[in-house]
Image (cartoon, grey):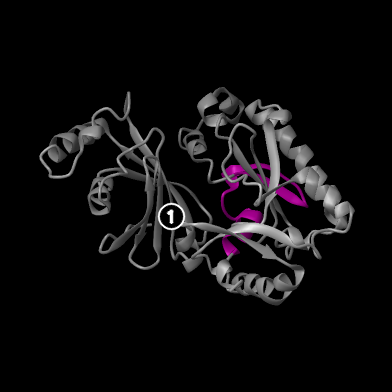
Amino acid sequence: MSLSTSSHTTLSSSPSHLSILLGTSQLLKLHSTPPFIFSLPGSSFLNILKWFTKTLTSTSGSEYSYYTYTLSPSRYTFLYIFYSFCPFPIKSLKNLYSSPPYTLTSEEITPASLRQINRSKKTQYILVHETSQIYSQKIEPWINGGIENGSINWLYNVIDKKKEVERILYDNEEFMINVDTKWKSHSKLFTDNIKKDDWKNYEDVVGELYCLAYFKERGVKCLRDLEGRHIQVLKDIKHKGLKVIKEVYGVEGERVRVFIHYHPQFYHLHVHFNLVDNDGGVQVERAHLIEDVIEVLGGGGYGGKTLRFRVGEEDDLRKLFL
């Protein structure tokens, strides 16, 4: 995917993350560990990015693609000397890394939906109360409309093993367990052709563990669609997921959190696995531990419950509660 730099808007930034909207529908989300130079003005950073070698690491076959950007030592030296004479600060560039190469990872979405763009902005969140009536009358039709318009076609490509097959950790007739694309540091194990038997030896990578299990049954969009008949497959997902994580990454099950988001980022039932040490995406109003989900399903499920969750003020979902 080529980057359009004719016009851009910085949506959010931090020392280790930068989200830029290029044009009207090309979303670029960059991540760096350790922190890079995301404090630079957007146009200046995009000019620097042109000096990096861009390598495709994975694609969903739809709007999502994932890349690494690598800066060679010689180009790094040139950039440091050149930008030392520019009006914006570049002093932090000199001591960013202890050794080359200098690498960033990116998620690029084209075309990005308005919801994807809004979710990338720095925003305030509010807590909403979703009754079963609100869900059936407003939320579910909105979800179904997005699915009918192809919002999860990229995921069907993954489940059908047309894309991202290198990320598969386990696969059977009911579910698939994959390395999640948000596990940014894992990409180097793919690009460096590290043997799977050796993955557990990369402690810096394993420390950011994040996997997903996808239901293969279509039409199960979220927690509200789960029924008692799904209890066994959820138990199997937990058991097999923890087993494969122990085998591949050497991480004991007691160190892994297994949960489901409500509302999820995309509307096809999926289960998250991450380390208990890591707090990303596990807010109490969003993450439901799989053990609790199984218990609720044994007592009738989520269909008639009022669920509470946070939503960004500019999220399309928020507008359905006004």
Q: Residue at x 65, y 25 (%)?
A: 250
Q: In the displayed structure, does residue 132 sit left or right of residue 81?
A: right
Residue 101 falls in image quadrant? top left
Is residue 158 shown in magenta?
A: yes
Does dot 1 land on a helix, a strand or a loop? Answer: loop
Q: In the displayed structure, does residue 164 sit left or right of residue 22?
A: right
Is residue 299 shown in magenta?
A: no
Give the quarter of the figure containing the C terminus: bottom right
Residue hosting label 1: 122
Locate residue 303, reporting x and y percent. 80, 64
Locate residue 195, reporting x and y percent. 56, 29
Q: Nearer the viewer, residue 81 or 306?
A: 306
Seen as rendered, the residue at the extreme left is 85
Q: Residue at x 20, y 33 (%)?
A: 91
How many marks overall?
1
* Residue 19 seen anywhere in this rendered image of the structure: no
Part of the protein shown in magenta: 152-179
Q: Residue at x 87, y 56 (%)?
A: 229
Locate residue 90, reporting x and y percent. 20, 38
Q: In the displayed structure, does residue 35 sit left or right of residue 49?
A: right
Locate residue 139, reporting x and y percent. 66, 71
Q: Is residue 123 above or below residue 202?
A: below
* Residue 189 seen anywhere in this rendered image of the structure: yes
Give the quarter of the figure containing the N terminus: bottom left
Q: Residue at x 45, y 62 (%)?
A: 117
**Mark 1, residues whose alpha carbon is within 10 Å: few (<14), some, or many (≥20)?**
few
Residue 87 falls in image quadrant? top left
